[in-house]
Image (spheres, grey):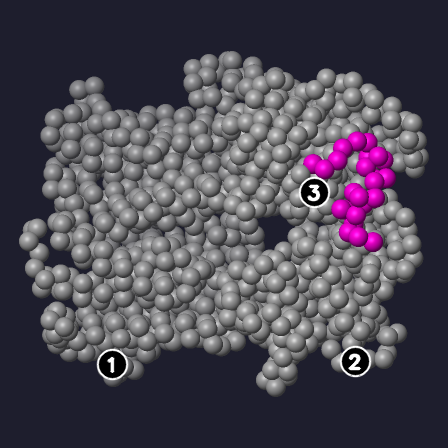
Amino acid sequence: MEPSDDRSGTVLEIRGLCCAYGRKQVVFDLDMLVGRGEIVSLFGHNGAGKTTVIKNVLGAYKPSGGTVHYDGVEITGTSARSNVHRGMALIPSERFVFGDLTVYDNLLLGAANLKDGDQQAELLSQVYTLFPILEERSKQLAGTMSGGQQRMVSLGLALMSAPRLLLLDEPSLGLAPAVVQEIFSAVRALADKGLSVLLLEQNVGQALRVSDRAYVMRSGRKILEETAQQMRARDSFWDLF
Amino acid sequence: MLAVTFDTVRQLITSGIVNGSSYGILGVAFALILGVTGRFHFAFGVLYTLAAFFAFTFFDRVGLPFLVSAAAGVVITTVMGVTIEAVIYRPLAARAGSNALLAIFVASLGLTIAGSNLIQIFWGAQTHSLLGIQIKPFELLGANIINIDVYSVTTFVLLVALLSSLLRFTGLGRAIKATRSNPEMALLIGVDPARIYLVVFAIASLLAGTAAIFASLKYSVEPTMGFRPVVLAFVVAFLGGTANSPVRVFLTGIGIGLIETISSIWLPVRWTQLVVFVLLVLYMISFSINRAMFARVRSLFAGKA
Amino acid sequence: MQVASNFIDQILIFSIFALSLNLLLGYMGQVSVAHASFGAIGGYAVGYMALTYGWNIFVAAAFGALLAGVVGAAVALPALRLSVEYLILLTLGVSSVLLGMFTTFPQLGGTYGLIGIPTASIFGHQLLRTSDWLIPLAVILAIVYGICHRLGESPLGRVLKGIRDDDKVTLSLGKNVVFYKVLIFGITCGLAGLAGGLLAGFNSLATPSQFGFDVSLAIFAMVIFGGTGNLSGSIFGAATVILTKPLLEWAVSLAPETAALWRLTLYGILLVVLMRLRPQGLIPEGVNILHPRTWRTARPLAVTSDQLPKAVVAASQEWETRLEVTETAAQEKQREVKWADAPVVLEVSDLSKSFGSIVAAAELSMVLRKGTITALVGPNGAGKTTVFNLLTGFIQPDTGSVKLNGVEVVGMKPNRVAGSGMVRSWQDVRVIPRLSSLQNVMMGVQDQAGERVIPLFANAGGVRRREREVRAAAMEWLEFVGMTDFADTPTGALSFGQSKLVALARVLSTNADVLLLDEPCSGIDTQWVEAMLSLIEKVREQGRTVCIVEHNLHVVDHLADHTYFMELGRITDQGTFKELTSSPRLAEAYFGTV
């Protein structure tokens, strides 16, 4: 989360990525870039393959083809564990907290890859500053909180690993517009400090407000690549889904 | 039979707690394995028996001091538990995919059958005594028990307290709970499930081995000693809830011990051992009815990819 | 001679145990570690009836089978919805209760059991020597094999395998899953009771240890050894487990007690090794040792090819050109007019469902019209799949009505809804992987004589005739989707796109008027999407009523005659797809505020 002026550096570079679940190929020949401090949105209908992309990037699954570079280093097919250590964090669209653990436990779990106790304390205080409600509710079981609060827990959990690339899967799902706005603003603020974000969304409107660039996928393939500004200027998105 | 004296009740409650705490500790161990790893580790009973036989051999045959022998028995069991997970269950699970539970159950069954017969081949079918601690009567609040009961209950309570502090206060404990609570998410934040599983098998085997040592001291060492405790451990684990805290599972075990002894007030002794299983079957029936309703609720959300 | 026949008798008796457990475990997929304790019911029935009332052993065994069957059917009820680990626990509990009861009743001899059961006799012949038992036991085994084979390798067996691999899909295709589970539990436990009765008669005693938990495990091991889902394998498994002991005594000259221990040790280790190397058992499902042709089935399934069936290629190419062209508003309006003229097949009114405070569906009203395609669209989590669950009885609505051709279907179980003419597909395909494409499609055909018990045994000719018809019908539907080349391929070896075609054929083969297709085009590549579109259009031309849930709006645009828009469990708008997409409010609901 250190501020960085170098906005040009590429954090994530995906080339010709193909992904499959067993017999079912889901992503075909995908190219994509995420720069430092950039929020890149990835849109597409349900089942277009967005989630598969980020799970393969993180290493939860191994891609069936193509390459993934992170900070210039090839990480295709490396384990999720090592990529988390490298500074990636992924928040899934559902079941993104440990429901029967306290908020505090959830946050500390995010910091499991840190050796340094001081850094952990500092990150914790940063997360508490960003979402004060988490400090108030630190002893509450995460599963008993409201949907929006659980989203905050999950963001806090991810930030506790001091990530440099955040992969966010539909953070707006099931949330009221005001809450979505709050969460998106928080993400924007983090990106302004140098965090790179790949944002998967169906809520195109809200996502475009905070994004720098956008990609659109349909049935496993990339069908569009634009700046957020260009995309906002479109009069309809129906033909992209 | 209806005129129950206060003394009888006091005695029954005390022995219920004593018996129940050993069901409880085994339940805690089994629940930890099933809850975190999802492995139906039936071979748990063989490990339990082996701990007793190794301790007996080191003490009675080799002549090591009792505490050393007991510790050696428990350590060997722990190593075996971890080895079973690493060498047998893990590769099986990787291969069997969605059928992993049944495949592992069958393999575990195989281990049980092979293990319990190997024990008879090596040690014979007869009953041995582990005379490591001299048995002395002990009076506790007017109830008559023996000194070993006091040691065992104290040890079990300590172990459960240790385990729950491990789960509550350490990073490893949090990682274990995280894996139990939400394995996919645990993987995403970089927790290595393979490592957690090994730790869980180590802890559970250690608990089981310790329980076996106390059972051998109080009763005897014999090839079939593992069967009933293990079946009770399953029952305790399921009734207590495999996702719940060890304290709660332990208390469930004590509850079952109490039900067993207290039911002897109204039932002939030969019936009391059945009570637990009748309760289990009744519980499963009500569970099945609840699940029917739960399944409907879940199918609502299952539609979402 | 007597020694040999002693072992053969045991093999014959344990084959009955193993066969019946295999029907339960291998065919229907229900785990039971209580099989020997159902044998105990038979064994004690024989002991008690023969000792107390002087009944003939075989009559008493039949009586014991009946008793065990009734208890087994009763156990099926709580077992209906349990997953494997709970089934293990439940049957473990049942086993403990049954054995505990037998040990507890003084009338049944307590721990010692019933001893000195009189010698069995059949047609006046006393079965004094073990060799006297050979023929009666062989005959009984043959009958039991016949029963299990008839149940397992028949249309009914197909349903059982469906339940084993995916009971929800089987239910959705109109099969009464509850009935089959209770039936098979009853029959298999009954057969275990029979075997137990024979064992007690053969040994002249009924003791708790004879039917102990370890015996249940041994029977379990026999089934696993032989191969689940393969009946001849079970006999082979029983023989292996039982013959290891004399073999060890003879080959390694071990003392009988030691040999018994080594035998158990060996088969314990073998179970572990088997699970690792050959989990399907020594003789896997579908293999007949006498027919080498069937041996290859043992090989693991591998994807054959991802070729789009030739028959479908043409159709997909036609679509490709059509997708390029955007329909004019006028053309679309024309379709809408045609839609409005079509007669209503399904009428949904005021359907609501909530779970506590969560509203899953609120006052849903919609109609599906004959020979048209209706689409449900809406943002994620709007509850579109829930609508399918509500319509087909997988979730019972709180209020409202669903009239299919004028008949109320609310309150019906899913299998009855399917029988009434409304069938759904599943978004993750859910074909039965171990069954061939053809068998998968055959499962969809309604009203099969061979799926009912009485015709199966009483009217073999009728069953065979109907099975031929079913096969022919299923072949037609496979041809319709262009998958005849893969008729005999297990669907587990098909590519995802190919299994989607098989799943479509399976839904079509039900002959249901109304087809609810859940994401028919998700997860497949462009060419396959086009093929799917052309097939769904053909289905419409046949006059069937189709409703799709689809997130690929491109697909909706080209396919739907009428579209309903859903938000948060409510239908908030309807019209042609173009009408809906021109509404700024719906765009906001779908994409968020821009």
| Circle 3 or circle 1, nearest the eye | 3
> Picture coordinates of residue C265 (x, y %)?
35, 56
Q: Mark 2 lies on which chain?
A: A
Q: Give the range drawn in magenta.
A: C571-594
Q: How far from the left and from the top, in percent, is residue C427?
A: 67, 40
Mark 3 neighbour density, 10 Å: few (under 14) some (14–19) many (20 or more): many
Residue C119, label in figure: none
- B210 vs C431: above or below: below
Residue kind at label 3, given as amino acid type: Glu
Q: Which amino acid does label 1 sit on?
A: Phe
**Residue closer to the observer: C113 or B202:** B202
Which residue is at a point 16% across and 45% down the rendered structure image? C104
Quarter-of-image position of residue C362: top right
- In the rendered image, the vertical position of residue C534 relative to residue C40, given as above or below: above
Residue C233 x/y as whole percent: 45, 38
Q: Which chain carries label 1?
A: B
Magenta segment includes A198: no
Separation (CA) of disc 2 from disc 3 = 41 Å
The residue identified by callout 2 is A3
Query: Which residue, given by chain and number where applicable, does mark 1 sit on?
Result: B66
Q: Residue at x 26, y 75 (%)?
A: B154
Circle 2 packing at 10 Å, graded few (<14), some (14-19), many (20+), is: few
Membership of C579 in magenta stretch: yes
Residue topped by disc 3: C567
In what element is the residue under mark 1?
helix
Q: Nearer the viewer, mark 2 or mark 3?
A: 3
| SS at circle 2 | loop
- Image marks 2 and 3: residues in contact by CB distance under 8 Å: no
